[in-house]
Amino acid sequence: MLKSYKPTSPGIRQLIQVRAKLSKKRPEKKLAFFSFRRNGRGGAGGRITVRHKGGGHKKLYRLIDSKRDKLNIPAKVVSIEYDPNRNCFINLLNYKDGEKRYIIAPEGIQVGDEIVSGEDIALKIGNRLPINKIPVGTQIHDVELRPGSGGILVRSAGSAAQVLSTEGNYAQLKMPSGEVRMILMKSMATIGQVSNAEFGAKVLSKAGRSRWLGIRPAVRGSAMNPCDHPHGGGEGRAPIGLRRGPKTPWGKQALGVKTRLKKKPSGRFILQRRK
């Protein structure tokens, strides 16, 4: 549910937040730890590889179970929690053998619900099955690219893929981007849509909230000098000029450029490119 506020101060004048019934308990101690943050840096010498990242509030990393390899062991949903490391919510599961694990929370799941992972189980939100056991037209998320590798596809807030067809060793899935691709039938996927579907409607309302999230200020290229950016320089406000289109700070084309490698081996599994 989205909540807006009365403009009692400049900081909340345009603020829109997502209100959900989340647990107020502390993160599970054995499943949360401090993780070293690189803040957009990588390569030799810690050079900046992604600009405008750094700072932000301190946060614990929650260990998420992407494989869910405890087959045919029922688990009870203990809590629905906020996770500062992702835009969806997470569930704490308590398995019948006493083990606790975190998973990505599906939309519509409630505290007290029982879910399970396996082959011959019910088609219920939160249950995890091989794709060959899931009917055509079903919405799924947290999809494995290779059997046993753990879910890496369709994990962001509000996203869901759809099973279009199943034939031979492969199933055709329609991704949230519109791309249609083939996935091995033995790969596991979770039934339902990822939680926090209204995440994209949030309004931060002030620069400080961006800084808490680790987002640093961005300067327009047109406000720079020619030596700093292709858009820089000129007297007054100058257009991009006679170039074909906007450029990156390094002089590359910024819009409409295909970035996927043409010879990438997994490209043959894509039947229809995203728009």
Image (cartoon, grey):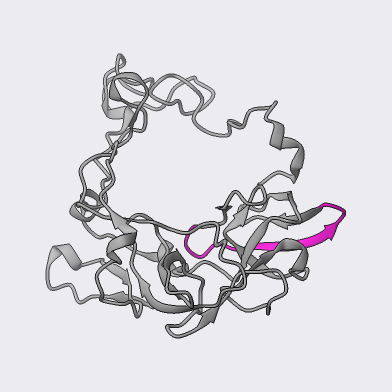
Is residue 210 in the magenta section? no
- Most distant residue in the front direction: 97
Magenta range is 156-169
Q: Whole-percent x and y of residue 245?
A: 51, 27
Residue 245 position (above or below residue 217): above
Q: Find residue 137 and report its image quarter.
A: bottom right
Single out the residue that lies furthest toward the left. Answer: 9
For image coordinates 63% across by 79% down, the residue present is 124
Residue 162 magenta: yes
> x%, y% of residue 39?
28, 37
Q: Could you say which is closer to the camera, residue 205 or residue 104?
A: 104
Within the image, what quadrant is residue 193 found in?
bottom right
In percent of width and height, residue 203 lies at 32, 62
**Would residue 164 be found to the left or right of residue 121 on screen?**
right
Q: Residue at x 35, y 54 (%)?
A: 85
Kindly indicate the quadrant of the structure image that contains residue 161.
Answer: bottom right
From the viewer's perspective, is 216 left or right of 76? left
From this view, report whether residue 62 is shown above or below residue 243. below
Q: Looking at the rendering, in which quadrant would you find the N terminus?
A: bottom left
